[in-house]
Image: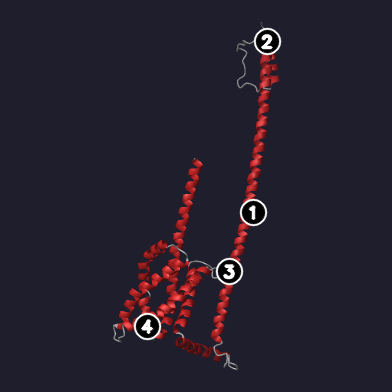
């Protein structure tokens, strides 16, 4: 009985060494009674050895499966990122090309029309200026251009005023786009064309007849005539023209009548009040100094500022409405996708 603990200890060491188990956290003291027999040790050690071996094999298989799946996922994510990067690079490159082409077209338009205008203004005396000095050309060119303008007014006053208003409204919209933050040669050609078309077809012709009607309605020459004409201009005519401008621009943008009506209601009084800060002072010269045939030219010079305000205000409302509509569409589509995923 005295040698039994040593035999048991040797057998237990054999079991632990065979099963490759970690040593116990607490050492077994000699006083601890050992109640198991040697006949029960070997079956348990074989079973535990088989069990541990199977667990280790399963762990290796699971680890291999996890590592393979992780590698596949990493490859897919890398491929997806590479594809997304390629798509982004291609898309970004195409956008840069389109932007460069648009800038080149806009620069060609501006330089072409600018060169044509300067050439026509400077060569007004091309039949007589042979042998003239540069000083003589610059001295007589403005005067002779003014004479040519007056002759055009006598021949076809409506067409001459339509041309002037078309140019002024195009330049005014270009200034408005630059004021909104767009680079000099990255303006919206469609928007500029719409504004110039409104100025050419409507403002020049309607203004010609309006000044004729205004003189017929108030023909007197007393001191109160100028304030009366300014008041009529800044109430009746301003309301009519601002409404025409916003409605026609809305139609050219292919907007619905409801949107045009809402935009007109939202901008009617603010634009009328904005005009009161500019036009009464300008019309002191219009109705007090300038002759009736030259009034539209003076008004168009001031229109460069006013068209900038009109164009900026109109397009801000339109773009804000478009962005709100796009936001509502995105919100609706996202909520629809969420509901479909929940189902």
Residue plotted at (45% across, 88% down): 154
Local crowd size for mark 3, using a 10 Å CA cut-off: few (<14), some (14–19), many (≥20): some
Query: Which residue matches tag 4?
Result: 212
Q: CA distance from mark 2 to mark 3?
A: 95 Å
From the image, state whether disc 2 or disc 3 is nearer to you: 3
Distance in Å between CA atoms under marks 4 and 3 = 42 Å
Residue 192 in the figure: left or right of residue 66: left
Q: Is the residue 285 above or below the residue 68 in the image? A: below
Residue 144 showing in the rendered view: yes
Quarter-wise, where is residue 19 in the image? top right
Mark 4 Cα-neighbour bin, 10 Å: few <14, some 14–19, many ≥20:
few
Q: Residue 39, which numbered label?
A: 2
Q: Is residue 127 left or right of residue 17?
A: left
Percent position of residue 92, x then y? 60, 59
**Residue positioned 65% across, 31% down in the render:** 62
**Percent x, y of residue 316:** 44, 64
**Does label 2 or label 4 sit earlier along the sequence?**
2
Q: Which residue is identified by label 1?
A: 86
Residue at the image position 63 percent from the left and 41 percent from the top: 73
- Is 286 or 292 nearer to us in this picture? 292
- The structure residue drawn at horizontal position 48% and vertical position 43%, both measured from the top left corner, is 339
Q: Label 1 neighbourhood size at 10 Å, few (<14), some (14-19), many (20+)?
A: few
Q: Nearer the viewer, residue 285 or 291?
A: 291
Circle 4 — which element?
Answer: helix
Please tell me whether mark 2 or mark 4 is closer to you in this view: 4
Q: Could you classify mark 2 by the number of other residues whose Cα lies within 10 Å: few (under 14), some (14-19), or many (20 or more)?
A: few
Residue assigned mark 3:
103
Q: Secondary structure at mark 1?
A: helix
- Quadrant in the picture for residue 289: bottom left
Determine whether label 4 and label 3 are within 8 Å by CB: no
- For the N terminus, the image quarter is top right
């Amino acid at each position: 009985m005295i040698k039994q603990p040593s035999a048991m200890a040797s057998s237990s060491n054999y079991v632990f060494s065979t099963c490759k188990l970690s040593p116990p956290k607490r050492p077994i003291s000699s006083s601890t009674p050992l109640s198991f027999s040697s006949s029960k040790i070997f079956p348990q050690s074989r079973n535990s050895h088989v069990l541990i071996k199977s667990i280790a094999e399963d762990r290796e298989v699971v680890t291999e499966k996890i590592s393979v799946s992780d590698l596949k996922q990493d490859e897919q994510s890398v491929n997806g990122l590479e594809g997304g990067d390629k798509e982004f690079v291609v898309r970004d490159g195409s956008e840069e090309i389109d932007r460069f082409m648009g800038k080149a077209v806009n620069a060609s338009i501006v330089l072409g029309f600018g060169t044509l205008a300067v050439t026509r203004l400077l060569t007004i005396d091309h039949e007589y200026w042979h042998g003239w000095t540069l000083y003589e050309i610059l001295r007589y060119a403005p005067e002779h251009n003014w004479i040519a303008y007056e002759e055009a007014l006598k021949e076809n006053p409506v067409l001459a005023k339509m041309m002037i208003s078309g140019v002024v409204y195009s330049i005014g919209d270009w200034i408005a786009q630059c004021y909104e933050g767009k680079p000099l040669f990255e303006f919206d050609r469609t928007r500029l064309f719409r504004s110039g078309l409104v100025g050419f077809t409507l403002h020049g012709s309607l203004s010609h007849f309006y000044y004729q009607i205004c003189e017929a309605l108030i023909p007197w020459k007393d001191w109160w005539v100028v304030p009366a004409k300014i008041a009529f201009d800044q109430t009746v005519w301003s309301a009519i023209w601002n409404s025409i401008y916003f409605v026609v621009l809305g139609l050219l943008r292919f907007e619905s009548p409801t949107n045009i009506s809402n935009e007109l209601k939202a901008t009617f009084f603010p634009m009328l009040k904005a005009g009161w800060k500019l036009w009464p002072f300008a019309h002191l010269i219009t109705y007090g100094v300038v002759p009736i045939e030259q009034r539209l030219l003076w008004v168009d010079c001031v229109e460069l500022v006013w068209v900038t305000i009109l164009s900026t205000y109109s397009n801000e409302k339109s773009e804000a409405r478009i962005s709100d509509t796009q936001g509502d569409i995105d919100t609706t589509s996202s909520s629809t996708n969420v509901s479909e995923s929940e189902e």
